Image (cartoon, rainbow, N blue to C red):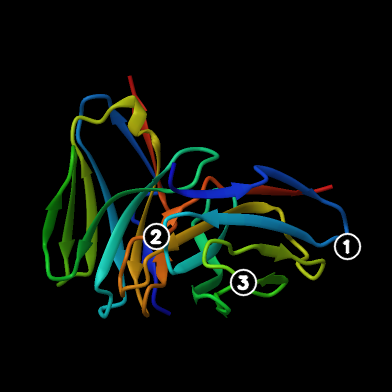
């Protein structure tokens, strides 16, 4: 069936380096994508979103790239900090306003 | 202070007992959602409501029930028919205008005694 998945379940990154988290989606009709950050025991926190008419969107220290040709989404975090340690989820908007979530990638920032 | 609140933070359920999880939002959002999250996994949709007095089943609705009598509130009842209720339950809301961001509450962790 249609799904959103992630390539890497765990990403270890040195403090100060850039992080790249990848996500593959299979529903070509999806028109809206979101990245969430979830810290242990808390609800997911919105990071950044992108609509299908865009290829790239930048926020504060974060960039989302969308490649519709290969159905790939990525989140880049610049100068990764200890506070960035969390699980990151991508989600795609399918029918109406229903989101389908990927399995998540855990980011561990090493000091 | 606007946002989504969930209560309680922790909830214990005895065998055969129904329990209700609270979700309230003061964001004036039309749509509300309930998700279940198991350890180390992603979110799965239980129920959602796009308007007051209307709701739809999500992917894993069996053993759960909801109501939407007020725009601000979307309580979830975990019934005794749900045989594996231990999980982290997350409520979310969004403005129902097509594709919109969903904002999440802090979650309720349900444990079985």
Q: Is residue B56 visible?
A: yes
Residue A70 horizontal side relative to residue B102, left or right: left
Q: Residues within 10 Å of mark 1 (few under 14, many from 20)?
A: few
Q: Which label lies toward us, 2 or 1?
A: 2
Determine if marks 2 and 3 fall on one subunit: yes
Q: Position of residue B42 (x, y in %)?
A: 49, 57
Helix, strand or loop under label 3: loop
Which of A49/A23 is in front? A49
Q: Quadrant of residue B1?
A: top left
- The residue at which mark 2 appears reads as B102
Which of B25/A27 is in front? B25
Q: Position of residue B50 (x, y in %)?
A: 47, 75
- The residue at which mark 3 appears reads as B69
Which of B76/B2 is in front? B2
**Mark-to-mark CA distance, 3 and 1:** 26 Å
Residue A43 horizontal side relative to residue B9, left or right: left
Query: Which circle's residue, 2 or 3, is located before the other in the chain?
Result: 3
Q: Position of residue A47 (x, y in %)?
A: 30, 47
Q: Which label lies toward us, 3 or 1?
A: 3
Q: Residues within 10 Å of mark 2 (few under 14, many from 20)?
A: many
Spot the residue most to the top: A111
Question: What residue sits 36% from the left and 50% below the top?
Answer: A36
Chain assignment, label 2: B
**Mark-to-mark CA distance, 2 and 1:** 33 Å
Question: What residue sits 69% from the left and 70% below the top?
Answer: B64
Marks 2 and 3 close (CB-CB < 8 Å): no
Q: Position of residue A46 (x, y in %)?
A: 34, 49
Chain assignment, label 1: B
Chain assignment, label 3: B
Q: Which label lies toward us, 2 or 3?
A: 3
- The residue at which mark 1 appears reads as B16
């Amino acid at each position: 069936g249609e799904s959103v998945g992630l390539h890497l379940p765990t990403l270890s990154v040195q403090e100060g380096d850039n992080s790249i988290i990848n996500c593959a989606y299979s529903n070509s009709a999806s028109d809206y994508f979101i990245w969430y950050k979830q810290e242990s025991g808390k609800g997911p926190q919105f990071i950044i979103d992108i609509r299908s008419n865009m290829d790239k969107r930048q926020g504060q220290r974060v960039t989302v790239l969308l490649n519709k040709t290969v159905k790939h989404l990525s989140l880049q975090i610049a100068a990764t900090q200890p506070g960035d340690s969390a699980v990151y989820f991508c989600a795609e908007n399918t029918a109406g306003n229903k989101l389908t979530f990927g399995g998540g990638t855990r980011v561990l920032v090493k000091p | 202070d606007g946002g989504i609140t969930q209560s309680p933070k922790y909830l214990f359920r005895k065998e055969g007992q129904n329990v209700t999880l609270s979700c309230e939002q003061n964001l004036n959002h039309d749509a509300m959602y309930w998700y279940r999250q198991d350890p180390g996994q992603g979110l799965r949709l239980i129920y959602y409501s796009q308007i007051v007095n209307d709701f739809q089943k999500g992917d894993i609705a069996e053993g759960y029930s909801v109501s939407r009598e007020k725009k601000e509130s979307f309580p979830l009842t975990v019934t005794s028919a749900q045989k594996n209720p231990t999980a982290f339950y997350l409520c979310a809301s969004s403005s129902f205008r097509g594709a919109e961001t969903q904002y999440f509450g802090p979650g309720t962790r349900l444990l079985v005694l």
